[in-house]
Image (tube, rainbow, N blue to C red):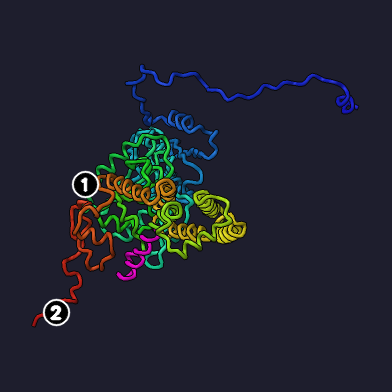
């Protein structure tokens, strides 16, 4: 009855207040009165109630339901408590090596031997890493990074226990830098796992892993790796200076740090090399370079880098000289074709017909006879379609992505030719261009070819081969002016006749790699003896 009445009778609508997201407070963005007032640091008081109240307030306990505070009563009714994040520690170690151990401590009175703070970690806490400190900020920072904090009543020092145990991805094969030869291990997201992978290759105490923290709030942990006595100290100082000068709240990945450290953010080519292979990072360290690794990132940053280093594939170091040089020549041709081929084709079709053989010109004219679009529209249409297929293949799951790329390319190309939207020769040009971009050894270099290709297409459509020549000249000048951490980006091509230049252009036998690259100004230049294959020396009788 009420339902029928509500349907037939008119009632004024109820107006609910619309939610509007407002600022919490109208505070001044900058108050000059607080400029010179430093933030007061908090210290361990020794009063267990005050310390516990401070920790609960700072960690928003119990609102944060993954913060665990374990209160303990020791012998002699002395109170203590542990606090940590659930899921970030090894609970078995905490139970066996911490809680059980401190419960066995004898009565701690003023007359007892065990009233000193260090007696707890020297005699009873059996865990490997335990550090006393009186700074609350340091304790909280370590707990946020997976440690456990221990407070004991009457002690003005708390204890940081390294009991981290995080779930992490196992060591897998490289995904973007694959090679048939050489090690088949890739970096993971755990920082210590990555440093161990490098130390397995470079077994020396001169390999320095200097700890850094990036991000005012996130405090992302990382290490700067370099070999003492080999890396140029000025290079190490420059890397340290740039890292310390980063003033951001949060840093998630090494790619973000690389963009914050590079000199020219708008350059087409990256000035920092990224790698996921421990063997490549180790080889860079032995050459005198500096490597940065961050916790949570499966890529390492290598400083400095050059254009020729980015053209080197990982397999070049493990192939015999003829094979490596053949592979390198193919990659260079592929890179130039992926950048210049569409622009050259367009400029020849539009402006330089006399360069095309007569019969080929007849064939091209016949294939384009029923195509309704100009050559520039035809080229851009196919290039954009190819890029869409590539992006879709990357975003899709692996089994579907590879199928999508092959089937999509075949169907799209065949359908476009059958519908007379594009000419068959244009399909060939786009296919060669795409294959050339896939053949580049560095992923960032493939992005460079994709961006430059559009620029040369525009130059070829406007000015023909003259535009292509002008573009090559201007971009060469731009590359020559770029530097990566004080090293010219085109090194060692600027120094003719040097051994570094010959090693950069062609792969030389491994027994000729006697010197480190001269442009790195390393402390120790020679890598191997002048005669490294002593078995070639004839014994004199």
Q: Nearer the viewer, residue 447 or 228?
A: 447
Residue 74's spot in the image, x, y percent? 44, 39
Q: Residue at x 77, y 21 (%)?
A: 13
Q: Nearer the viewer, residue 512 or 51?
A: 512
The residue wearing badge 2 is 538
Mark 2 to mark 1 CA distance (whole Å)? 41 Å
- Which residue is the extreme one toward the top? 33
**541 with respect to 311 (left or right):** left
Q: Residue at x 32, y 64 (%)?
A: 317
Residue 318 inside the magenta-drawn segment: yes
Q: Residue at x 40, y 38 (%)?
A: 141
Q: Main secondary structure of the magenta part?
A: helix
Residue 74 inside the magenta-drawn segment: no
Pointer 2 or 1: first along the chain: 1
Labels 2, 1: front one: 2
Q: Is residue 96 visible?
A: no
First to last magenta residue range: 315-335
**165 with respect to 496 (left or right):** right
Q: Pointers 2 and 1 in contact (CB under 8 A)?
A: no
Q: Secondary structure at mark 2?
A: loop
Q: Nearer the viewer, residue 4 or 164?
A: 4
Q: Secondary structure at mark 1?
A: helix
Q: Nearer the viewer, residue 523 or 480?
A: 480
364 vs 235: above or below:
below
The residue wearing badge 1 is 233
């Amino acid at each position: 009855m009420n339902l029928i009445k509500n349907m037939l009778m008119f009632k004024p609508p109820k107006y609910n207040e619309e939610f509007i997201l407002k600022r919490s407070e109208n505070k001044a963005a900058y108050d000059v009165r607080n400029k010179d007032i430093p933030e007061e640091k908090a210290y361990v008081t020794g009063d267990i109630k005050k310390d516990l109240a401070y920790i609960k307030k700072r960690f928003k306990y119990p609102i944060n339901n993954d913060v665990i505070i374990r209160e303990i009563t020791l012998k002699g009714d002395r109170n203590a408590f542990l606090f940590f994040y659930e899921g970030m520690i090894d609970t078995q170690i905490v139970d066996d090596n911490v809680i059980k151990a401190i419960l066995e401590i004898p009565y701690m009175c003023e007359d007892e031997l065990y009233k000193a703070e260090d007696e707890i970690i020297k005699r009873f806490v059996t865990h490997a890493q335990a550090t006393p400190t009186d700074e609350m900020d340091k304790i909280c920072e370590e707990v946020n990074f997976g440690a456990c904090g221990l407070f004991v009543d009457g002690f003005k020092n708390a204890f940081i226990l390294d009991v981290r145990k995080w779930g992490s991805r196992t060591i897998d094969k490289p995904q973007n830098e694959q090679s048939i030869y050489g090690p088949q291990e890739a970096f993971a997201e755990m920082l210590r796992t990555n440093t161990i992978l490098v130390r397995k290759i470079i077994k020396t105490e001169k390999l320095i892993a200097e700890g850094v923290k990036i991000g005012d709030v996130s405090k992302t942990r990382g290490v700067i790796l370099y070999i003492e006595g080999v890396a140029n100290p000025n290079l190490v100082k420059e890397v340290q200076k740039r890292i310390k000068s980063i003033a951001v709240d949060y840093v998630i990945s090494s790619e973000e740090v690389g963009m914050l450290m590079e000199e020219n953010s708008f350059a087409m080519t990256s000035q920092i090399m990224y790698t996921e292979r421990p063997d490549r990072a180790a080889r860079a360290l032995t050459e005198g370079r500096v490597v940065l690794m961050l916790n949570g990132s499966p890529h390492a940053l290598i400083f400095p880098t050059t254009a020729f280093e980015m053209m080197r594939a990982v397999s070049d170091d493990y192939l015999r000289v003829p094979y490596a040089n053949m592979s390198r020549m193919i990659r260079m041709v592929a890179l130039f074709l992926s950048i210049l081929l569409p622009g050259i084709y367009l400029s020849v079709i539009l402006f330089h017909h006399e360069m095309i053989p007569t019969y080929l010109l007849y064939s091209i004219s016949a294939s384009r006879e029923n195509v309704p679009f100009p050559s520039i529209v035809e080229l851009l249409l196919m290039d954009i379609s190819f890029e869409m297929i590539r992006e879709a293949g990357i975003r899709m799951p692996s089994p579907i992505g590879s199928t999508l790329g092959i089937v999509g390319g075949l169907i799209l190309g065949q359908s476009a030719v059958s519908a007379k939207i594009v000419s068959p020769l244009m399909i060939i040009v786009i296919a060669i261009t795409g294959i050339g971009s896939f053949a580049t050894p560095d992923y960032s270099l493939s992005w460079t070819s994709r961006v430059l290709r559009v620029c040369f297409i525009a130059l070829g459509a406007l000015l023909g081969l003259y535009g292509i020549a002008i573009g090559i000249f201007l971009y060469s000048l731009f590359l020559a002016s770029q530097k990566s951490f004080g090293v010219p980006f085109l090194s060692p091509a600027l120094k003719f006749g040097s051994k570094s230049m010959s090693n950069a252009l062609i792969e030389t036998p491994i027994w000729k790699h006697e010197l480190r690259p001269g442009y790195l100004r390393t402390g120790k230049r020679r890598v191997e003896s002048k005669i490294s294959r002593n078995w070639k020396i004839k014994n004199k009788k």
